[in-house]
Image: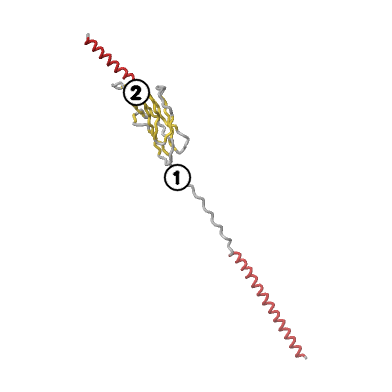
Amino acid sequence: MKASRRILFIVFFLIGFIIPGSALADDKAIEANIPVEVEYDGYDKEEFEFVIEKLDGSTSYMPENTSISIEDKGSFGPIDFDIPGKYQYLIKQVPTDKPIITYDERVYHLDIYLQYLENGNKSISMVIYGENGEKVPKIKFVNKRKWSPNPVVPDKPDKPDPEEPIPDQPKNKEVNKKTNNSNPKMGVESVGLSIVILLASILALFLLTRKRREI
C-alpha cells in the first residue's frame, strides 16, 4: 500500500509539473518578421512600395502595416503567431507612373509554419516560392532604370555672328568715282577757257598791230 501511494504521488507530481509548463509554452506567441529587398541600378535614390496580402483568407495574422516603402531593405512585421498551423501570404510591388523605371512584377508566395517541438515549445519557419513555384532563398525585387542606348544631346544654339560693320569701301569708291568724274570735266573746261582767252588775246594783238601799220 505504501509503495502504491508513493508511485501515485510521484505520477501526480510529474503530471502537475509537466502540464503547467506545457500550457505556458502553448500560450507563448512567437514573433516573426518578413524581410524584403529591392535592387535598383539607377544613380538616383528611389523608394519603392511593397504590399503583403493573405492568400485566400488562410490567416488572420497580419502585420500592422501591410504596405512598406523602402530604398533597399525592409520588412513586414512583427507578426505574433500563437496557434500552430500553416499561414500563406502573397508579397508584390506596387509600381508608380514613372516612365523611366521598369518595375519587377514578380509575386512571391510565402508559407509560414508554426509547429510544436518535442519539448513542447513552438518553432516557426518560412518557405518562399517564386512565380514558377520554385523555392527561393529570399524575397528580392530587381528594378531597372531605362537607359537610352544613344542618348540624344540637344544641340546648342549657334551663336549669332557679330554684326559686321557696313563697309565704307563702296561709298569711298562711289565718292572717288564722282570726284574722278568731276575733276576731268573741270580740267577740260579750264583748258578750253584758257585756249579761248589765248586766241582772243592773239586776235586782239593781231588787230592792234595791223591798225598801227595802217597809220
Tell whether 30 sits left or right of 95. left
Determine which residue is flagged by label 1.
151
The amino acid on which the numbered mark 2 sits, given as a three-letter code, is: Leu
Q: Nearer the viewer, residue 111 or 8?
A: 8
Q: Residue furthest front?
A: 2
Q: Is residue 115 above or below residue 205?
A: above
User: Which label sits on residue 114?
Assistant: 2
Q: Residue at x 58, y 62 (%)?
A: 167
Q: Residue furthest right?
A: 215
Q: Residue at x 72, y 81 (%)?
A: 200
Q: Nearer the viewer, residue 192 or 179?
A: 179
Q: Nearer the viewer, residue 148 or 95?
A: 95
Tell whether 158 sits left or right of 120. right
User: Which label sits on residue 62?
Assistant: none
The amino acid on which the numbered mark 1 sits, given as a three-letter code, is: Pro
Q: Residue at x 76, y 88 (%)?
A: 211
